Amino acid sequence: MFKTVLWATDGSTAAERALSVAKSIAKTYDAKLLVTNVPVVLGNSPLAVAASQESAERTEAALQRKVEDLKRDGVTVELALPEMTTHGVAHAVAEFARDAGADLIVVGTQGSGWLARFMVGGVTRRLLELAPCPILAVPPEDQDVNIRPGDSVPSID
């Protein structure tokens, strides 16, 4: 069913939870797992570009360690980082997924700080509109919804 699964991360807790889901799907379907992060430049000043580049390098090193751990766990995995963007992250992820032939994109539902939650939550929602394949959005643990048999569920009117 899935041959290529894309895990797009922003480094948030929700994204980390999404990795465990992406890993499980990749192992279950013997699929290739692509690991990505879209570096963003917030501003056009040389200082903003330098800070963004430094952050992107730290992120790449951390993701490379994750990729090595995944390989040790028997996952067919590849780190694939698109170019830094000043445009929308959702557009970059959707384009990358299209180019990579992804069958599924796995993402967290929101980032870690209030700004990240606003931006990444918006990215996930926008990605739902732009993606060339299904999206699996994984919430952070504190937002899990546990419905047990016999629980009343509110209507969606």
Image (cartoon, grey):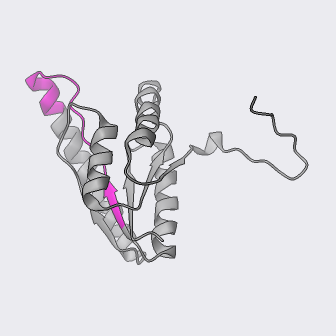
The picture quadrant where one finds residue 140 is top right
Question: Which residue shows up at 54% across the image and 48% down it?
Answer: 138
Question: Which residue shows up at 38% across the image and 76% down it?
Answer: 72
Residue 36 visible, this angle? yes
Q: Horizontally, is 79 left or right of 147 in the view? A: left
Exactly how many numbered labels are in the figure?
0
Question: Which residue shows up at 33% across the image and 58% down it?
Answer: 35
Vertical position of residue 99 compared to residue 41: above or below? below
Is residue 98 within the magenta segment? Answer: no
Vertical position of residue 144 compared to residue 103: above or below? above
Is residue 44 within the magenta segment? Answer: yes
Residue 62 screen position, x and y as percent: 30, 53
Vertical position of residue 70 compared to residue 94: above or below? below
Per the rendered image, the range of residues in magenta is 33-51
Q: Horizontally, is 144 left or right of 24 in the view? A: right
Q: Horizontally, is 50 left or right of 116 in the view? A: left
Quarter of the C terminus within the rendering:
top right
Residue lying furthest left? 46
Residue lying furthest right? 150
Residue 53 screen position, x and y as percent: 16, 38
Vertical position of residue 71 compared to residue 126: above or below? below
Residue 28 screen position, x and y as percent: 52, 75
Residue 56 screen position, x and y as percent: 22, 43
